[in-house]
Amino acid sequence: MLHETHLRSMNGKSQAVIKEKSDGQGLGVRVSKQGRIRFQFRYKIKGKNKRIDLGYYPDLSLKQARDERDKCRAWLAGGHDPKVAREMARDKTLEPVTVKDALEYWIEKYARVKRVSFKKTQSQFNKHIYPYIGHYPLEQTQITHWLECFDRISVGIEGVQKPAAVAAGQILQACKQALKFCRVRGYAITHALDDLVVGDVGKKAAIKDRVLSYSELKDILQWSHGRKGSFYMRYLCLLLIVFGARTQEVRLSTIDEWDLGNDLWTVPKQHSKTGLVIVRPIPQQIKPVIALLIKRNTKQGYLLGELREDVSVSGSGGKICNKLKHRERWTLHDIRSTFSTILNDLEVDSRVVDKLIGHVIKGSERHYNHSKYLKQSAAALDMWCEWLDRLANPIDNVVEIDFVKAC
């Protein structure tokens, strides 16, 4: 058995011959003629003798060498070659997966394909996570490191950042999903966030039940028809009103999605929140507008002429609400809720409404009913456009809405 005093006495002292001494259980030292002491672990696999160089004394102490020996014995007992296992563990220690590495791995391998709004999530990581703990080795992070990030979001920073409790909860959920993805894939492992729920760091977004009044809807419709304000936002709002689509579906819409020959707008699955293709009829009343937008923006490729970020569009929507001096605040998403509510009030079949707004049909029909309800949807949208005409022009048959003029 080796002793620290014996090792110190040999270290750096010239030896007549190379010496080898055992400490037991596979651990030993090899002393060169120059007095360099190297720890080694010896073992057998399928009857073949093998050894691993663990390190040199005194850089590696006797106690540390014994700890390394115990790890090697544990790997061997588990059916792993200690040399291979040790090299893998060493690489992992020298080049650990950082918090940023892990979250970006999820962004690239999952969110970029599965989440239409992945850029927003990535932007949140860039702002709230990476500057503070992005460089930390993921497996060494503790719950306190993450809580500091979420608290900054939820409570805010005076004079710098407003409190955003809902955003804190959303970012927590995204981080948990990302880290679980990394864990399942074997890319990196941590359980630091497992016990946290949204209520620990912020709050869930309130269920939106805002439905615009007829007068508010009329204001937006007439504003869209006018020439004041952003061309982009005027036609975005018009399309949201007519189709009841999600903002992202219109924002991301490319010209090749619009088939005026068959009067169909096909939203590809990569632009759909549900990951399913959405097919909507194009009402005759709005068809000239779509034709003009296609002609105007063919070179750009996007129906509205450009691709704007979600945050920018959302912020512009809030300014419209202020500009129209509506007392109760509404969002662009509330236009969609209004569309659905009024169509149901007009006794349109709820399954048709679900198809128009791009909802997944619930229950057994989800698996067995694959009808697109195109005929019924076309009739519903035609009726809806006529209803909007009467809303904007209370005196019937006097003036029809002609949005093409606003182009």
Image: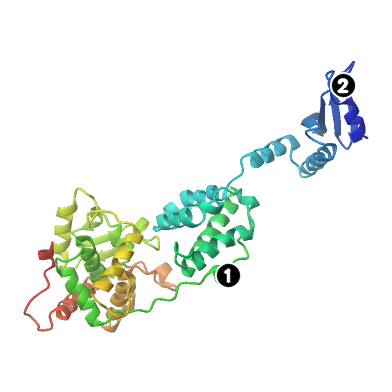
Residue at 27% x, 78% y: name it: 326
Q: Which quadrant: the C terminus? A: bottom left
Residue at 23% x, 82% y: name it: 214
Q: Mark 2 points at which residue?
A: 13
Residue at 27% x, 73% y: name it: 322
- The image quadrant of residue 209 is bottom left
Real-space CA distance between mark 2 and mark 1, rounded to the nearest whole angstrom: 61 Å
Q: Can residue 47 be seen in this view?
A: no
- The image quadrant of residue 271 is bottom left
Position of 231 compared to 330: left or right? left
Q: Nearer the viewer, residue 363 or 270?
A: 270
Q: Where is residue 364 in the image (x, y as percent from the top left)?
A: 44, 72
Q: How crowded is mark 1: few (under 14 residues within 10 Å), some or many (20 or more)?
A: some
Question: Mark 2: which secondary structure?
Answer: loop
Q: Position of residue 312 (x, y in %)?
A: 32, 60
Q: Name the residue under label 1.
A: 200
Q: Nearer the viewer, residue 41 or 355?
A: 41
Give the amino acid at mark 1: Asp
